[in-house]
Image (tube, rainbow, N blue to C red):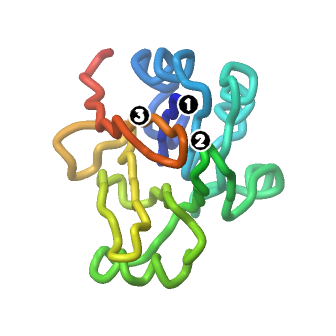
């Protein structure tokens, strides 16, 4: 199962639309996971129409309509793994241990908020993934998103993709 992980898209505040490379990844993915901060419902509408399957949550910059349509936390089983999707996880210091305590039955935690890519594994085996942002790099050198494969209870081919300017 091919996965696309995105977060902090902030459309149309930080970009008019998702970059072409992200839309191409949407078309290639079996499941698109969005970890919040959509900003406007139009992107949710577009992804619901175009994605084969969409799993998402709302973020701190998402208003009442997005909060009505999306959960604060989404839980789903994909490829034999339990995924939890949430926007905020708090401070980076101690994140793995804190999230392992908060999500003891989760295999993969996908989160956003910081716009900083993150890929670590807690001592319990919980995998923590933040794809960064495809539209707002903030203090990062590049805008980013992630792809991965989930199959037979294993996550593989976790790749961080740079979004080149103007692409």
Q: CA distance from mark 2 to mark 3?
A: 14 Å
Quadrant position of residue 32: top right
Q: CA distance from mark 1 to mark 2?
A: 6 Å
Mark 3 Cα-neighbour bin, 10 Å: few <14, some 14–19, many ≥20: many
Marks 3 and 1 in Cβ contact (< 8 Å) = no
Residue lying farthest front?
A: 152
* Residue at disc 2, secondary structure: loop
Marks 1 and 2 in Cβ contact (< 8 Å) = yes
Mark 1 Cα-neighbour bin, 10 Å: few <14, some 14–19, many ≥20: few
Q: Which residue is mark 2?
A: 79
Q: How many marks?
A: 3
Q: Position of residue 127 (x, y in %)?
A: 40, 60
Quadrant position of residue 93: bottom left
Q: Position of residue 36 (x, y in %)?
A: 57, 52
Q: Position of residue 4 (x, y in %)?
A: 49, 33
In this view, 103 is above or below 61 = below
The tag earlier along the polypeptide, 2 or 3, is 2
Tell me the residue at 29%/38% (across/down).
Answer: 160
The tag earlier along the polypeptide, 1 or 2, is 1
Tell me the residue at 74%/50% (across/down).
Answer: 66
Marks 2 and 3 in Cβ contact (< 8 Å) = no
* Residue at disc 1, secondary structure: loop
Mark 2 Cα-neighbour bin, 10 Å: few <14, some 14–19, many ≥20: some
In this view, 137 is above or below 23 = below
Asked whether the viewer can see residue 135, the reply is no
Q: Which residue is mark 3?
A: 147
Q: Which residue is mark 1?
A: 1
Tell me the residue at 35%/53% (across/down).
Answer: 115
* Residue at disc 3, secondary structure: strand
Position of 143 with respect to 60 (left or right) is: left
Q: Position of residue 139 (x, y in %)?
A: 21, 52
């Amino acid at each position: 199962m091919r996965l696309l992980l995105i977060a902090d898209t902030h459309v149309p505040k930080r970009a008019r639309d998702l970059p072409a490379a992200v839309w191409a990844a949407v078309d290639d993915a079996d499941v698109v996971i969005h970890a919040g901060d959509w900003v406007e419902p139009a992107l949710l509408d577009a992804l619901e129409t175009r994605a084969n399957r969409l799993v998402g949550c709302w973020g701190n910059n998402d208003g009442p309509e997005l909060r009505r349509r999306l959960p604060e936390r989404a839980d789903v089983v994909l490829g034999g793994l339990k995924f939890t999707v949430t926007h905020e996880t708090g401070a980076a210091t101690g994140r793995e241990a804190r999230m392992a305590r908060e999500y003891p039955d989760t295999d993969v935690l996908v989160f956003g908020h910081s716009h900083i890519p993150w890929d670590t594994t807690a001592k319990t085996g919980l995998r923590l993934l933040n794809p960064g942002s495809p539209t707002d790099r903030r203090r990062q050198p590049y805008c980013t998103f992630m792809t991965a494969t989930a199959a037979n209870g294993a996550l593989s081919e976790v790749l961080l993709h740079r979004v080149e300017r103007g692409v």
